[in-house]
Image (tube, grey):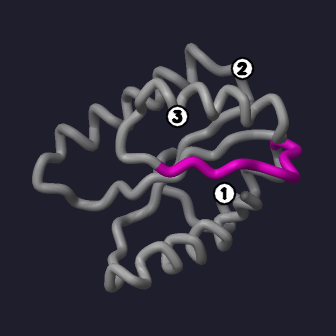
Amino acid sequence: MLYQRPAESRKIFSDLGWKELQLFSSATPCTAPTNSRKIAVEVMDGVYIHQLVGKLKQETFRDVRVKAIEVLVDNYFVKGTLIQGGYPMRCAMPAREALLHAVFRQNYGCST
C-alpha cells in the first residue's frame, strides 16, 4: 500500500520491530542514494522511502518512479529492511516547505 496515514506507518514500523529508522525522500531512484540506503540498513532498524505522490502533469513519471523503487525493495534489499510509502503532495511557501515536510515525516514516525 503506497498511501499511508501516520498511524498506519507507525503500526508498520512497530510490527517490524523498528525503533530507529532512516527516512529517505527522493524524486528519483538513483544509484548514489541506493548505496546510502544500503549503508543505513546496516546501522538502523530500517529505511522508509517516503515520497510525494500527488497529481503530476506526467502521471507516467510517477508510476515509473514508484515501480522502480518497488523493484529495489523486492530484489536489492533484504526483506523487511526497507519499505516504501507516500503521501499526497502538499506545498508551502519555499522558505517553509522543508519545515512542513519535516513535520509530516515526524508525524509518520521517522526518527532521522
Report the amino acid beneath label 2: Val
Magenta part of the chain: 16-25
Query: Which residue bears the numbered disc 1?
Result: 9
Does the magenta segment cover residue 24?
Answer: yes
Q: Nearer the viewer, mark 3 or mark 1?
A: 3
Q: Which sits in the foreground, 49 or 5?
A: 49
Q: CA distance from mark 3 to mark 2?
A: 16 Å
Report the amino acid beneath label 3: Pro
Query: Which residue bears the numbered disc 3?
Result: 33
Task: Specify the quadrant that holds the C terminus.
Answer: bottom right
Q: Nearer the viewer, mark 1 or mark 2?
A: 2
Q: CA distance from mark 3 to mark 1?
A: 22 Å
Image disc number at residue 44? none
Secondary element at image label 3: helix
Q: CA distance from mark 1 to mark 2?
A: 19 Å
Sequence-first disc among 1 and 2: 1
Which residue is pictured at 63% across the width and 33% down the height?
37
Query: Which residue bears the numbered disc 2?
Result: 78
Q: Which sits in the foreground, 15 or 109?
A: 109
**Counting other residues with Cα less than 10 Å from the Cα at mark 1, is it few (<14), some (14-19), or many (20 or more)?**
many
Does the magenta segment cover residue 89?
Answer: no
**Counting other residues with Cα less than 10 Å from the Cα at mark 3, is it few (<14), some (14-19), or many (20 or more)?**
some
Report the amino acid beneath label 1: Ser
Q: Which sits in the foreground, 28 or 89?
A: 28
Sequence-first disc among 3 and 1: 1
Q: Position of residue 15 (x, y in %)?
A: 82, 46
Q: Which residue is farthest left?
A: 57
